[in-house]
Amino acid sequence: MKQLPDLRRWHGRIDVEEGPTGERWHQRMQCVNADTDPAIVLLGFLCDAGIQRNHGRTGAYNGPAAIRAVLGNIPLRGSNRVADGGDVCCTWKANEDGLEVAQKELTAAVAALLDQQHRPIVLGGGHEMSVGSFGGLAQHLSTGSNAPRIGILNLDTHFNLRMTERATSGTPFRQIADDCKERGWDFNYCCLGISRFANTPSLFDRAETLGVRWRLDEQMTALDADAIRDMLDEFLAGVDHLYFSIGLDVLPADTAPGVSAPAVRGISLDMVEMIVDMAAASGKLRVADIAELSPEYDIDHRTARLAARLVARLAYDWRAA
């Protein structure tokens, strides 16, 4: 179910004496409509169903609200307009958790925003959201005569390539691989921050078979920065459109405690922000999302503040095509 945006949920400090350069996100926020000029548009995905099916700890349904609550008070920098696109809600019914319906609704919502030349950032919600984020981009690009070269960049400790009877938060990129195969498109997937202790050998084998590029969490230190930049430069050079996904559980548990599966090691915020900056400045970024915020397990709003900071950083640096 799609819920319309509501500006009443945006609030924060107002420094009248500082003038326009003292404004914060809540003061510049607008609702998306047919007449809205191209903007960075936030779209919530309220869903726990994929995590529940994956036997994780639920709570991500409330993630988008927690991000907006923090983001509203962050100073707005840069010239990009910002807007609220509302929420896609996964609605439970008798004997059905509504996941597949919600993913289709997210696909349609993302595609509609792209058709209007907006730049969507989807707020989660479990990582099952990636099916809708990618699906919307694929729908938007499918009208062309040639197969689009889409790159998928994911920061995560998990490949999320699992084989299961039903979709879960652990299957989205395998589903996307299947979708690409059906369309006759290349599956260009790069996953950074993978843990050897959170993925079975079968998942590493599947990643190898699908031609996935990855780096382990232990290969994502400050000493590896140059190698990571080179890897990303090569990856971005081979695609025309980028879908960028951040699983908050890629960060260490003390930095991001409010997630479904906290990371024992993870990668540093410095490294995450370096990659965010490269993606945003590439000129190829079309859709981004931030997954796995579970406010119920957060400590002092650490994870919500982290997610809001990453959204603000993306919006500031996101260069239009």
Image (tube, rainbow, N blue to C red):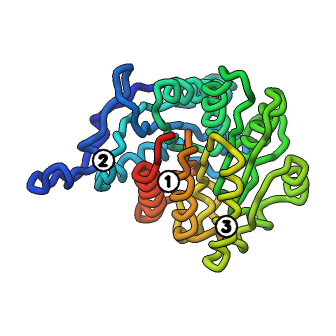
Q: Residues within 10 Å of mark 2 (few under 14, many from 20)?
A: many
Q: Residue at x 44, y 26 (%)?
A: 3
What amino acid is found at the position of numbered circle 3 in the picture? Ile
- Mark 2–mark 1 CB contact (< 8 Å): no
Please name the residue shown 61% across and 77% down the image.
222
Which residue position is annotated with label 2? 25
Query: Does any portion of residue 294 appear in the rendered image?
Result: no
76 left or right, relative to 293: left
Q: Earlier in the sequence, mark 3 or mark 2?
A: 2
Residue sitting farthest toward the left: 17
Numbered tag placed on residue 228 in the rendering: 3
Out of 297 and 111, give the one closest to the viewer: 111
* Residue highlighted by disc 1: 296
Give the residue displayed 46% in from the left and 60% down from the top.
Answer: 306
Of callouts 2 and 1, which one flags the residue occurring earlier in the amino acid sequence? 2
User: The disc labelled 1 sits on which kind of residue?
Assistant: Glu
Identity of the amino acid at label 2?
A: Trp
- Label 3 or label 2, whichever lies nearer to me, is 3
